[in-house]
């Protein structure tokens, strides 16, 4: 009798634990009142985008009363981690934001992402409204797995007033750029160029662009593929030397702060030059009334790379394989011309939908940036999205070590080559 | 009737056993199992690689650097938290401070109650190279040559992180010592007074031997804590610049969730477990705890 009691208590406990584990599986089904539930996950819990998407969801649910959208959001780095956990636990949201290239490729390799070729070809009117070249980062083996939405690029932003005051012209070549930094230094700006090097991605953005300039594109293509990457080209050493030299102008505070702090310094007019994304234009404008312009990363003399390649990759939306069919409709809604125009007006970030960036919803600087993005001879993805993350990490940590003087370009490349070797195997 | 007695205690133990089993021992075994595979969270399958991850572990220079950081953490924590906290506790329990001791106790204990993430964010402002409290203070007292970007300098980063930990944890350890000191029979001190022993003599000959058990527990807490330390370096520096303030746990996290080498991360986790188990065993042996006389 006692044994029975013990056993039944044990069973009771066990069943409660097990049922707790199972309760998550039921989320994709319809709700009790017959509504279709779409789980929507994005990475902007901060304003203005959170409100923007909340508003859009409300709008969509009002227009489609049989659909209920659950929304969830976490910020950047946490997003990267959370989406990985969700992928591995079979709990992938129905529609979610994703970076392009290697980040997207990783997600696709889980075989849980919906291939979109059929969806795109069925509705040409919608799919062709998005700038063709921006699809590249979501295409793997001829299949498209994502719809690009925001576009971006990186350039040196400079404080116009400070440049004029010191008679400095916008540099056209790398040597001119260094000369400009030197004269700014003489003018009393101890760190004429600033960057938050605790954000390792900021280093990867620098390195990616530098390598685009100094290394032959064919070599880059070979090295960026994990199966064939060797990283033996002397151009990489030169590239790291360039970064080391630039880090010399960032001052020793740079390794102790993040990119946001660097941006604030630029906005406060304390620092004349900052390597920044176009997506940040509006943030600087809202933080201050500094007048600024921008120039592309200058050409490096003797560099074998593309002197005008633009670094920057789109972000977009992905749909889970098991998502309800209404999700596609919601995807079209999110990437429609109206949503896109309103989005750019609210947020300032440029988007890939044709005709959605106009002088009415962006300022002159952003308009100029948009033209640069859409007319670039070639676009290179962010370095940490272009190469395998293990390689990127060696470069990013190495970049920090170069900035603090703990390491040399040769040492960093030795580690990179070792990592590349173990990835080839 | 004879069976009734073991049954009731068993029933009480069962829930905790079940939870320990599901949430501690099962994951532990699974982690060791995982470390023999190479997989990412994205890959639908795991690839068996045998001891390859452990081989990689032995050749990885970063592991050594991280381990050295953990050792620095442990040594400084033991020195500061165990010995200094004992001194602090003794002072707080001294007759001289009887009136203000309760207030001081609260002050020292306050940081323990604040979430470590909050503290770490707070300290990023303290260490901020431009407007940080620390550098401003150094300038104020005329020591501006000592001001550096504490977290951005490869040689100071790990010490800056450790210093924050000490600030946070010392109150907790002090509290444990205070409780232990209060349990020491007053007669011992009275006898020492009669024998003419001074405060220092009483500290070494009465307080230390009497709080030995607590001291052992505290050493165990700080050392195992030092091997597992994650939040502080992760939030303050992310392990940087370079790998200068990386600890084993940060490395494990980066490998697993940053670089998606789940198998290798499992191997590091196994290493961390083995290390902390070894330290705990050594300490239990050395101190011979449990044999209370």
Image (cartoon, coloured by chain):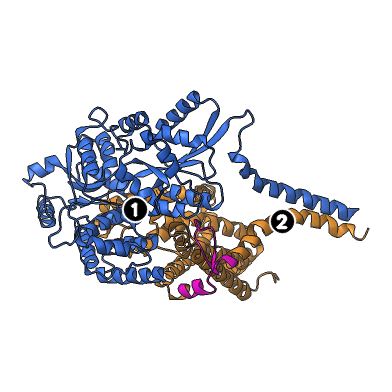
Chain colours: A blue, B orange
Which numbered marker is on residue B18? Answer: 2
Who comes first in sequence, dot 1 or dot 2? Answer: 2
Whole-number angstrom distance, CA of label 1 to CA of label 2: 45 Å
Report the front residue among B100 and A94: A94
The quarter holding residue B206 reads: bottom right
- Depth-wise, is mark 1 or mark 2 nearer the camera? 2
Magenta residues, start to end: B33-56
The residue identified by callout 1 is B127
Query: For the residues tagged 1 and 2, is the chain the same?
Result: yes
x and y, in percent, of residue A371 in the image: 21, 39
Q: Is residue A200 visible?
A: no
Report the front residue among B127 and B60: B60
Q: For the residue labelled by badge 2, is the local secondary structure a helix, a strand or a loop?
A: helix
Q: Is residue A37 visible?
A: yes
The quarter holding residue A266 reads: top left
The quarter holding residue A243 reads: bottom left
Q: Residues within 10 Å of mark 2 (few under 14, many from 20)?
A: some
Where's the C terminus of chain A, which quadrant? Answer: bottom left
Q: Please say if the residues under marks 1 and 2 sit with CB atoms less than 8 Å apart.
A: no
> The disc numbered 1 marks a residue on which chain?
B
Q: For the residue labelled by badge 1, is the local secondary structure a helix, a strand or a loop?
A: loop
Residue at the spot 27% in from the left edge and 29% down from the top edge: A361
x and y, in percent, of residue B23 in the image: 64, 56
Residue at the spot 27% in from the left edge and 44% down from the top edge: A263
Which numbered marker is on residue A26? Answer: none
Residue at the spot 24% in from the left edge and 39% down from the top edge: A370
Side of A282 relative to B166 (left or right): left
| Magenta span contains residue B48 | yes
x and y, in percent, of residue A38 in the image: 53, 36
């Amino acid at each position: 009798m006692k044994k029975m009691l013990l056993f039944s208590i044990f069973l009771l406990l066990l069943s409660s634990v097990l049922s707790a584990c199972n309760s998550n599986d039921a989320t994709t089904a319809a709700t009790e009142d017959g509504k279709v539930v779409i789980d929507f996950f994005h990475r902007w819990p901060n304003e203005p985008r959170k409100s923007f998407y909340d508003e859009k969801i409300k709008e969509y649910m009002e227009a489609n009363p049989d659909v209920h959208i659950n929304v969830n959001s976490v910020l950047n780095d946490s997003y990267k981690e959370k989406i990985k956990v969700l992928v591995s636990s079979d709990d992938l949201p129905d529609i979610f934001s994703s970076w392009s290239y290697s980040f997207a490729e990783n997600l696709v390799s889980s075989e849980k992402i919906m291939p979109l070729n059929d969806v795109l070809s069925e509705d040409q009117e919608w799919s062709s409204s998005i700038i063709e070249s921006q699809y590249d980062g979501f295409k793997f083996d001829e299949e498209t797995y994502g719809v690009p939405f925001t576009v971006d690029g990186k350039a040196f932003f400079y404080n116009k007033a400070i440049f004029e005051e010191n008679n400095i012209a916008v540099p056209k070549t790398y040597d001119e750029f260094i000369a400009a930094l030197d004269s700014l230094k003489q003018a009393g700006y101890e760190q004429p160029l600033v960057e938050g090097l605790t954000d390792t991605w900021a280093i990867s953005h620098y390195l990616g662009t530098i390598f685009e300039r100094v290394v032959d594109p064919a070599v880059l293509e070979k090295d960026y593929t994990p199966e064939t990457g060797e990283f033996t080209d002397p151009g990489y050493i030169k590239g790291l030397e360039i970064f080391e030299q630039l880090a010399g102008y960032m001052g020793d505070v740079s390794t102790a702060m993040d990119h946001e702090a660097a941006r604030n310094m630029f906005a406060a007019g304390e620092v004349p030059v900052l390597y920044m994304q176009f997506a940040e234009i509006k943030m600087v404008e809202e933080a201050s009334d500094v007048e600024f312009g921008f120039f592309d990363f200058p050409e490096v003399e003797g560099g074998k790379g593309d002197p005008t390649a633009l670094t920057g990759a789109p972000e977009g939306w992905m749909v889970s394989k098991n998502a309800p069919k209404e999700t596609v409709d919601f995807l079209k809604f999110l990437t429609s011309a109206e949503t896109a125009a309103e989005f750019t007006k609210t947020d300032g970030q440029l988007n890939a939908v044709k005709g959605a960036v106009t002088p009415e919803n962006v300022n002159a600087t952003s308009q100029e940036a948009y033209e640069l993005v859409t007319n670039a001879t070639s676009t290179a993805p962010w370095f940490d999205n272009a190469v395998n993350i293990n390689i990127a990490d060696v470069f990013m940590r190495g970049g920090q070590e170069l900035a603090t003087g703990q390491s040399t370009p040769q040492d960093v490349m030795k580690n990179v080559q070792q990592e590349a070797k173990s990835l080839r195997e | 009737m004879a069976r009734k007695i073991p049954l009731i205690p068993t029933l009480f133990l069962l829930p905790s056993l079940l939870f320990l089993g599901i949430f501690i021992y099962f994951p532990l075994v699974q982690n060791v199992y995982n470390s023999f595979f190479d997989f990412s969270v994205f890959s639908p399958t795991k690839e068996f690689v045998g001891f390859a991850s452990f081989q990689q572990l032995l050749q990885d220079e970063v592991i050594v650097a991280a381990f050295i950081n953990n050792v620095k953490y442990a040594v400084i924590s033991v020195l500061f938290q165990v010995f200094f906290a004992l001194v602090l506790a003794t002072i707080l329990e001294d007759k001289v401070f009887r009136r203000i001791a309760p207030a001081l106790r609260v002050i020292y204990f306050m940081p323990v109650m604040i979430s470590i993430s909050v503290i770490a964010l707070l300290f990023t402002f303290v260490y901020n190279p431009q407007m940080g409290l620390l550098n401003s203070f150094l300038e104020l007292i005329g020591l501006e040559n000592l001001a550096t970007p504490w977290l951005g300098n490869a040689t100071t980063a790990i010490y800056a992180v450790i210093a924050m930990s000490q600030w946070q944890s010392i109150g907790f350890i002090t509290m444990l010592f205070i409780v232990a000191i209060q349990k020491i029979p007053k007669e011992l001190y009275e006898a020492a007074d009669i024998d003419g022993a001074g405060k220092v003599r009483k500290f070494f000959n009465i307080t230390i031997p009497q709080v030995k058990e607590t001291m052992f527990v505290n050493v165990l807490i700080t050392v195992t804590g030092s091997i597992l330390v994650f939040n502080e370096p992760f939030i303050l520096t992310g392990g940087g610049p370079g790998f200068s303030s990386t600890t084993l746990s940060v490395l494990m996290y980066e490998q697993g969730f940053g670089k998606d080498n789940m198998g290798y991360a499992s191997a590091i986790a196994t290493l961390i477990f083995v290390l902390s188990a070894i330290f705990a065993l050594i300490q239990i042996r050395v101190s011979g705890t449990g044999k209370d006389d």
